Image (cartoon, rainbow, N blue to C red):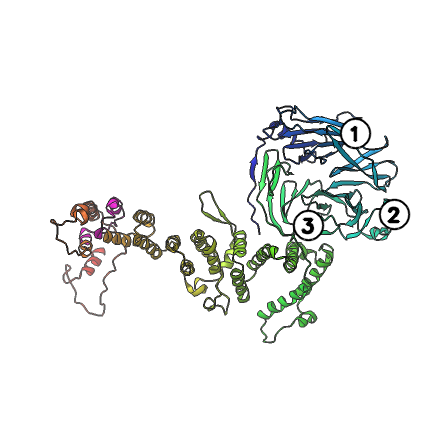
Amino acid sequence: MTHFRPPQLVSDYSDFGRQQGLRDALRAGPGDCRLLSSPDRRHLFIWLLRQRRLLSFPRLPADVPLPGAYLEQSWLGRDSPQLCGLLFPHCPQDWLLCLVWENGRADVWSPPRGPSAKSWLLLQSLELCNSARARVVSVCGGGADLVWCEQRAPSSPYMYCICRRPLRLCGQQVTLGSMKIVLHHSPWYSMLSSPHHIFMIPDAGSHPLLIYSLLEDKMTMTTPTTGLLHSKALTEGDFKKMVLEYSGFLSSQVPTAVLQSEVTEDGHLLLMTTSGRIYLIYENGVVRHIFDIEIVAEAQIKMQMFEKVLACAVDTTVFLVDINTGRLLAKQLLQAEELFFSRVSDTEEVQVLTRNGIYRIGSSIGTEDEGKSEPSLLDMVYEEACKYYQRRSLSSAKLTVPEIKKGGMFQAPVTLSAILNNYQKNGKSKDQTQYADLLSNINDELQSFVSLELLKTCIINASEEDIAKFCEELVDHEVTRLLQMDIDRDCLVYINSLFSTFPKAAWMSVRNNFQFLQNGDGKLVIGATAELWKKVLSPLPVGSRESPHNGVYPLFEVLCRSLCTFKPKWLPTFVQHAQDCSGLSWNFSTKDNFEGAPLYKRALSVLGQRKENTNVDLEVEILLCSGRPQAIIQAIHKLIYQQHWARVIEETRKFSQLSPLITKNIFITLLIEFVKHRHLDPYINQLCEICPQDMTATEILRIVLQNMPKSEAEPPPFSCSGGAHLTVGLLKPLLNKVLQNQVRNEKFPVQTFPPTTPQRTNKSVSRSPVLNGDDLSPTDFYSTKAL
């Protein structure tokens, strides 16, 4: 699954002309503003509905000097015709702007191009309609043709006509070809265009949605709920006759009111109904249900498709949905009064416009096929129920699917099967009132589960090029599902198989589920929940204690292996997070974990299986992150072996407060190294700082004499090796420090670490009375003084 980053600001409109005017225009109010971008992305148009104004904002640097690059139109008078559409008809040179008004007038503008053009140029004002009484209610452009819906008699709901007229450009002269009536006796339709098709969206939910092919002169009839009805070449062009054959069927359907519609870059139609259902309608009339969104009255809805991700904004909440699987990928809340989707730059990432600037939200990789749910889905419910109840049964008799179906004892699988059956047939779970409470809790799971079954079928029907993309989505579905289950032995075997067969896809799913992010310092930040950590740290299932020897690893080891393969630098931080979460109050003890080993040792065992040469550095980091004294000592010894002296001193000073045992062990080890060679001479002051308080000069001299290197060369002071030998002068700062500590300890005694154990006395030996302390042992003497 694709990971979506938080919205990133890519433009504060400083690269557009009249930046402040642009921001003010975007404050017009909810639902009062429409945004359009020119085909070359050089001009942004804002259509203010209530203010009756159209403003253009060129991208800097403009082709012509400002303010000639601006276009501004207004229609403020009561008798002024309303702007009905803003189109970009195709022309051989580049593109044109066509403003179509309610009275049928079409103003064709040429944008300024090059230094010779001073401003926008009005090429021609044309009349689309043949009748002066006609009123244009909707218009769109298909290639070089204009297609519109005009009203001819206001008294009848079927007195609209769908008309088509070509637009021709010869030099600076614009002309219209002859008008063709595509449909007459038609209801009101809103027009949206793709490169070769016109989508006609009915104003009333009882009418079908029409798709007109410009090249084939063919009409396709479809509805969002039932899909394709027919697709035929136009002969008479009479709407009433065209739908007469299907009038009985259409009248029996529940009316579907359209709330929002948008044409995608691929030429498909995105459509949302008032119930919040989102459909994708293809040019051939095929309908796909994508997703359901809970909406409230008066909510502002915006939709657009970027690559294979549907971006739907409900007020200021953006839903990102995979078009192919219908799965909700992300849900983000933006701090803005109103959002707009518009392609203002040539990128496939989601582009969001607010009054503060232009934001982008990640990117995605989609798939290009879909399938149907497997018929065995309901049988799978009973099979899983058999396994579930068998594990909890005290009887040795094996449960079977027919027994669960007929016995009437187990209601959960029967209920779930009925819900899935209805969900598959109707695509909607709200009709089952008897399961209303249950459905309110599992509706998201139902959508995800059905989408998973669709995705499985897509893999079967996919080409070789697309199989990898489908498998990545499928693995993400499965890993996410498994991490939400109680992990038994079969589940653990399945997880190992997934990570072994699809390592990269499984790793991407782990990143998303555990919310692995990298902060500004390059450090790993993990946003996993406590429940997810509980799955990772839970003890092995019964019967799996010997699993690692058979190639089946616990979940913690599986994740460590994945981290070692794709992000080994994150492994120490992951282990540290796991150790922090292992202290939470869960109902299992540490001895229940895999072989009773600490987590850092389990991670080291995984690391030892790698063949790379970077294992030593990772081992050191894991040992240091463990926080255990013996592990820290082991890590510092590895650093000493590598002669990373600065790091050795730094880590020793860092962990000296954790345990005096660490300080004393490392100090003695460094003192031995100091005796053997001269690499630590620059660090003599730091060595003095970490010297334990209870060290004496006698102990230091003893360690020095015991570890002096044996050399066959001439003894000092006649040695030829110069300053390669240890001298008293080198030891002087350390001896001074120790002697000062001894003097201080004599004046102010401190308890040593570890404290000395009092000598045991043999109470069975009888003693004669003593007077004035005679015949007392030292221990008895001090005990008497304490009294």
Identify the magenta region.
674-701
Q: Position of residue 68 (x, y in %)?
A: 65, 24
Element at label 1: strand
Residue that label 2 marks: 241
156 or 392: nearer the eye?
156
Q: Which residue is mark 1?
A: 126
Name the image quarter holding residue 22: top right
Q: Which residue is mark 3?
A: 292
**Of callouts 1 and 3, which one flags the residue occurring earlier in the amino acid sequence?**
1
| Sequence-first tag of 2 and 3 | 2
Quadrant containing the C terminus is: bottom left
Circle 3 SS class:
strand
Q: Amino acid at mark 2?
A: Lys
Please name the amino acid that badge 3 sits on: Asp
- Image coords of residue 578 (percent x, y): 46, 55
| 690 part of magenta stretch | yes
